[in-house]
Image (cartoon, rainbow, N blue to C red):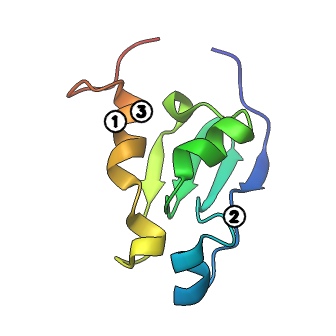
Amino acid sequence: MEKLPDKITFLGSGGGRVVFANQLRNFGGFVINLDGHQVHFDPGPGALNCLAANMISPSDTDVIFVSHAHIDHVNDLNAVVDAITLGESTRPEL
């Protein structure tokens, strides 16, 4: 597997309840690639769409970090986990 470049990709800046309710900005969190590892922080609503728009493969994710259980930080956690594992109970070898 090719090593991912070190970088931080913001998948949205989110906002308060009004911004969330009206989807005025993306809430996908952010992804850090460092030393060949990919960490996705706070996968909020639309996280998978934000990953796709930034050409980031969820299957490259090694760690998901959720800072707290507000919907704008955790909404798409299950969807991201499912994308990482391709619906399996263990991570597939790709």
Q: How crowded is mark 1: few (under 14 residues within 10 Å), some or many (20 or more)?
A: some
Q: Mark 2 points at which residue?
A: 12
* Image-quadrant location for residue 83: top left
Residue 1 seen in the current view: yes
Q: Which amino acid does label 2 sit on?
A: Gly
Q: Residues within 10 Å of mark 3 (few under 14, many from 20)?
A: some
Q: Distance between the residues labelled 2 and 1?
A: 21 Å
Pointer 1 with pointer 3, Cβ within 8 A:
yes
* Image-quadrant location for residue 27: bottom right
Q: Mark 1 points at which residue?
A: 82
Q: Which residue is drawn at 35% across and 17% down?
A: 92
Residue 16 seen in the current view: no
Q: Residue at x 34, y 35 (%)?
A: 82
Q: What residue type is labelled 1?
A: Asp
Residue 72 vertical placement versus 87 (above, below): below
Q: Position of residue 84 (x, y in %)?
A: 42, 32
Quadrant containing the N terminus is: top right
Residue 76 vertical placement versus 23 (above, below): above
N-terminal label among 2 and 1 = 2
Q: Name the residue under label 3.
A: 83
